[in-house]
Image (cartoon, grey):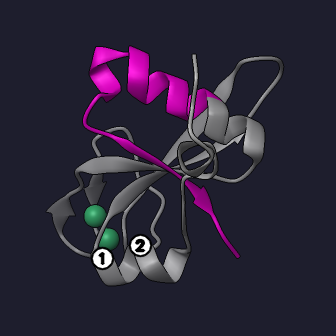
Amino acid sequence: MQESPSEMNGMVVTRTTLRDLKRDYFLARSGGSEELLMEPYCWCGSALEQDYFCTECNHKCRVTMIACADARALSIAQALVRTNADFHKFEAATLGA
Ligand SMILES: [Zn+2]
Ligand SMILES: [Zn+2]
């Protein structure tokens, strides 16, 4: 599939950006081969349990962002957003320092 350079690079978010935007997110890393390891976080920085309820903010988080820690994770996440109906409302971004 052809991608423009801007789509390839995508946007860059930082934990500060995510907090300012109040965006709950998955922290994504690439595992072996094409595997994507995703851990849910609240925008406040708390790691979330299975129920996605943040006890710090007292709200149920709605994760719509995949913040990718490495380039391979980003390319897997971008493919997921494009091709997987469960992820079509998500945005994939590079997690900056
Ligand atoms: Zn939250
Ligand atoms: Zn929170």
Label 2 crowd (10 A; few <14 / some 14-19 / many >=20): some
Mark 1 near mark 2, Cβ–Cβ under 8 Å? Answer: yes
Q: Is residue 97 above or below residue 39?
A: below
Left or right of 91: which side holds 13?
A: right
Left or right of 35: which side holds 81?
A: left
Residue 21 badge: 1
Residue 77 badge: none
Q: Amino acid at mark 2?
A: Leu
- Identify the residue under disc 2: 18
Please provide the residue range marked out in magenta: 76-97
Helix, strand or loop at disc 2? helix
Q: Quadrant of ligand 2?
A: bottom left
Q: Quadrant of residue 82?
A: top left
Q: Amino acid at mark 1?
A: Leu
Residue at 31% of width from left, 47% of height from top?
Answer: 64
**Cα distance, mark 1 to mark 2?**
5 Å
